[in-house]
């Protein structure tokens, strides 16, 4: 009942004219940038992060929600029309969606993706509204040892989930944690790793690192391997609308996609990749038309797209209630909170209820806006796909640099942005994931302060981390998550040798 009252109050906040304007701008910007080839939701939010620096915190975060959902939708358009997924979670959509487009059924593919995203987003946001208060009540009783153990679990799961190997993920995470130690120590007031540069006393800005690694790094990476003849978008033939048979074959995959996406997205190591592929394989097994899979089965678009968007709402559960980002986009959104001095977690629900519940309510509005605006504007999104690659990524470089300098006018900041951009290029070149670095920068200082508080309370005895059941359980899970990939890799090698 309390959740319903809080959500009702959130709708009053979200329906304010300025917040509606922010939501619509976010949806349009997110879709506009997300529909461009090679640009996923994480890069979209990172690129637009500096733009919102001067805005009201509530309106800015509502705009972020629109950007997030718009970027997710835009990625499906790119995957279907030019077979270029904006992110790994859209790969499953591209398998069947592009085949449908080549067969002249691009309209129904885009329609089932849009409607499935809407259905999944609405159901998953209802789940977020009712699950978040339960987690908040649980997290209120956490001590500093519990928070430290929770962050260790987040470190390990993020490092193990992203990238081709856990070791590469941990290396990227270590870079982020090292950058997080730069600045004035919160407990002693001493400068750490500033090397006499006054601008570093405030620490490394999360915005600068996120934009550098994601936007600048991606632009340089694309420029380094630019193809002379990029794939052209497939023109949409016939009606955009779905037939009665399409509806009949889509509604069950939408619901099954939600069942996969929301709970897995809410897990510390969830993400959107696992539920989308689970949804795809499930639909392939349950389909009455298995012969169509690989040739353009509409279930193969409906299920993964629903799972993708449901997982997006799922990632907001640990982000808002515990302050833990479980995906690259959630890490960038956490940076958006922090640029206003807001720290997601159980206290945020008590200190800023209007902001939190206004944000949750705005997710419903953003979903409805996506459905109403995007299908009629599909012709515009197709034209955006024709932008030449050099113009597109040249514009990204200029936009990213101008946005960062507007937020932090400093030569040192610009130098760090360029340096992080080249670091992002090298990380992509040698297959190191960039998301753990951002997570390390955000959570590193928090883990540091929580550990030191726990040790102060135990008079320096580290056994306090194992004596408390909550922290001991979380550390055991972290150890399991860290060792599991190596064990699985060893077992697979053993089986290959045995065969």
Image (spheres, grey):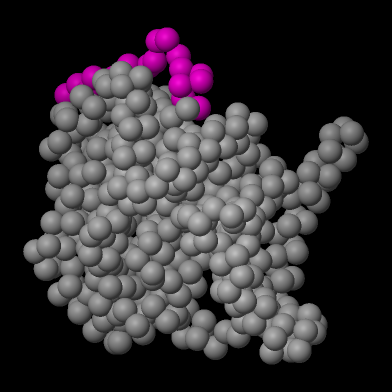
Which region of the structure is painted magenta?
Answer: 221-238
User: Measuring 35% from the left and 25% from the top, which residue is drawn there?
Assistant: 394
Residue 382 appears in view: yes
In x, y percent, where is residue 380? 17, 30
Q: Nearer the viewer, residue 253 or 173?
A: 173
Q: Left or right: where does residue 161 sit relative to residue 283?
A: right
Residue lying farthest to the right in this orientation: 498
In x, y percent, where is residue 422? 54, 33
Q: Write down the quadrant of residue 190 in the picture.
A: bottom right
In x, y percent, where is residue 465? 73, 80
In x, y percent, where is residue 448? 64, 70
User: Measuring 67% from the left and 76% from the top, which residue is drawn there?
Assistant: 451
- Quarter of the figure that contains the C terminus: top right
Vertical order, 79 against 408 (above or below) = above
Residue 327 appears in view: no
Q: Is the stretch drawn in magenta largely helix, strand or loop?
A: loop
Q: Nearer the viewer, residue 66 or 348?
A: 348
User: Measuring 20% from the left and 44% from the top, which residue is drawn there?
Assistant: 28
Is 460 included in the stretch rendered in magenta?
no
User: Measuring 16% from the left and 63% from the top, which residue is drawn there?
Assistant: 19
């Amino acid at each position: 009942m309390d959740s319903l009252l809080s959500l009702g109050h959130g709708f009053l906040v979200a329906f304010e004219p300025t917040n509606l304007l922010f939501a619509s701008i976010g949806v349009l910007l997110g879709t506009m940038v997300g529909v461009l080839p090679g640009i996923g939701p994480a890069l979209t939010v990172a690129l637009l992060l500096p733009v919102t620096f001067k805005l009201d915190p509530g309106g800015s975060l509502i705009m972020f929600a629109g950007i997030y959902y718009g970027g997710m939708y835009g990625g499906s358009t790119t995957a279907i029309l030019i077979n270029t997924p904006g992110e790994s979670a859209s790969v499953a959509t591209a398998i069947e969606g592009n085949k449908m487009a080549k067969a002249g059924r691009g309209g129904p593919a885009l329609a089932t993706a849009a409607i499935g995203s809407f259905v999944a987003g609405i159901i998953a946001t209802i789940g977020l509204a009712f699950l978040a208060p339960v987690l908040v009540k649980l997290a209120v009783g956490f001590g500093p040892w519990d928070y430290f153990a929770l962050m260790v679990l987040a470190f390990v799961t993020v490092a193990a989930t992203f990238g081709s190997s856990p070791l590469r993920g941990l290396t990227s995470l270590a870079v982020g944690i090292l950058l997080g130690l730069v600045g004035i120590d919160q407990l002693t007031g001493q400068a750490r790793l500033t090397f006499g540069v006054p601008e570093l006393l405030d620490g490394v800005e999360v915005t600068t690192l996120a934009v550098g690694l994601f936007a600048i790094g991606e632009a340089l990476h694309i420029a380094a391997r630019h193809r002379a003849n990029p794939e052209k978008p497939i023109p949409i033939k016939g009606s955009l609308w779905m037939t009665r048979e399409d509806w009949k074959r889509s509604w069950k995959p939408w619901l099954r996609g939600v069942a996969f996406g929301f709970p897995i997205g809410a897990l510390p190591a969830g993400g959107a990749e696992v539920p989308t592929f689970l949804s795809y394989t499930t639909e392939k097994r349950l389909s009455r038309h298995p012969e169509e899979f690989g040739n353009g089965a509409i279930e193969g678009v409906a299920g993964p797209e629903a799972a993708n968007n449901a997982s997006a709402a799922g990632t907001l559960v640990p982000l808002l209630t515990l302050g833990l980002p479980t995906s690259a986009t959630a890490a960038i959104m956490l940076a958006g909170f922090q640029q206003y001095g807001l720290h997601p977690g159980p206290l945020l629900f008590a200190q800023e209820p209007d902001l939190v519940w206004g944000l949750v309510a705005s997710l419903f509005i953003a979903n409805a806006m996506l459905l109403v605006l995007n299908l009629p504007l599909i012709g515009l999104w197709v034209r955006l796909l024709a932008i030449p690659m050099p113009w597109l990524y040249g514009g990204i470089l200029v936009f990213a640099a101008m946005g960062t300098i507007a937020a932090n006018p400093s030569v040192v900041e610009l130098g760090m942005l360029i340096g992080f951009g080249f670091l992002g290029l090298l990380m992509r070149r040698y297959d190191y994931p960039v998301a753990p670095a951002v997570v390390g920068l955000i959570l590193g200082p928090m883990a540091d302060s929580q550990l030191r508080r726990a040790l102060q309370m135990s008079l320096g005895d580290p056994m306090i981390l194992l004596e408390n059941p909550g922290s001991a359980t979380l550390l055991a899970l972290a150890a399991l998550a860290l060792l599991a990939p190596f064990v699985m890799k060893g077992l697979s090698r053993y089986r290959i040798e045995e065969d």
